[in-house]
Amino acid sequence: MNIGLFGGTFDPIHHGHTALARGAQERFNLGCIHFVPAHIPPHKQRHPVTSYFHRYTMVALATANHKAFRPSLLEAPTEAVVNEIAGKKGKHQSPEAGVNYSIDTVRRVKQTLKKNDRLFFLIGIDAFKEIAGWREADALFSRM
């Protein structure tokens, strides 16, 4: 299955986010898209950010009417999160109360994929403009 991983601050989530996801879903035949709000986005620490749980709730509400869109707890500020990507009952470690880096999330998700799954990393244009400065940006591109 083709799986989308859409990370961002989502503060707030808006029609541009869902339009990008719908376009990617159609273009790349994505079976599902996981919307992953960052607990502490590294590039937005100079600006006040709405609480993680409020942003997650906004994502859940905005994606509720889209069968393939799934709000994700992958970067939730908790010790252990249900492994929703694999649909398993086991748990995996999420970042503790620290900054979330996309490369770490991608690595965790890739470990849960089946042999025939393909991961597509989606981000907004605002994040893409700064991607060269991201942690292990080259590795992020090569992992896909």
Image (cartoon, rainbow, N blue to C red):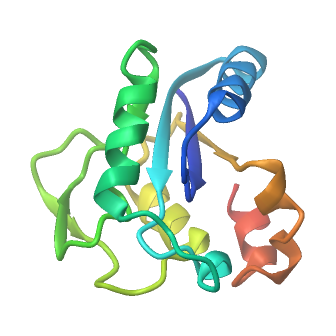
Q: In this view, does 65 lie above or below 141?
A: above
Q: Is residue 71 visible?
A: no
Quadrant placement of the C terminus? bottom right
Question: Would you say 91 lies left or right of 28 here?
Answer: left
Question: Would you say 75 lies left or right of 140 here?
Answer: left
| Camera-side residue of 61 and 35 | 61
User: Which residue is found at the position 48% from the left and 66% from the top?
Assistant: 105
User: Which residue is found at the position 55% from the left and 41% from the top?
Assistant: 13
Specify the quadrant of the image occupied by residue 39.
bottom left
Question: Residue 106: x and y, percent?
Answer: 54, 62
Count how many numbered circles sit on residues in the image: 0
Specify the quadrant of the image occupied by residue 28.
top right
Q: Is residue 44 above or below residue 119?
A: below
User: Which residue is found at the position 32% from the left and 42% from the top?
Assistant: 57
Q: In this view, does 35 lie above or below 70?
A: below
User: Which residue is found at the position 65% from the left and 27% from the top?
Assistant: 15
Q: Is residue 120 visible?
A: yes
Question: Would you say 34 lies left or right of 87 here?
Answer: right
| Camera-side residue of 77 and 106 | 77
Question: Residue 56: x and y, percent?
Answer: 36, 48
| Camera-side residue of 31 and 97 | 97
Question: Residue 133: x and y, percent?
Answer: 82, 82
In this view, which residue lies farthest toward the left?
89
Question: Residue 54: x and y, percent?
Answer: 33, 52
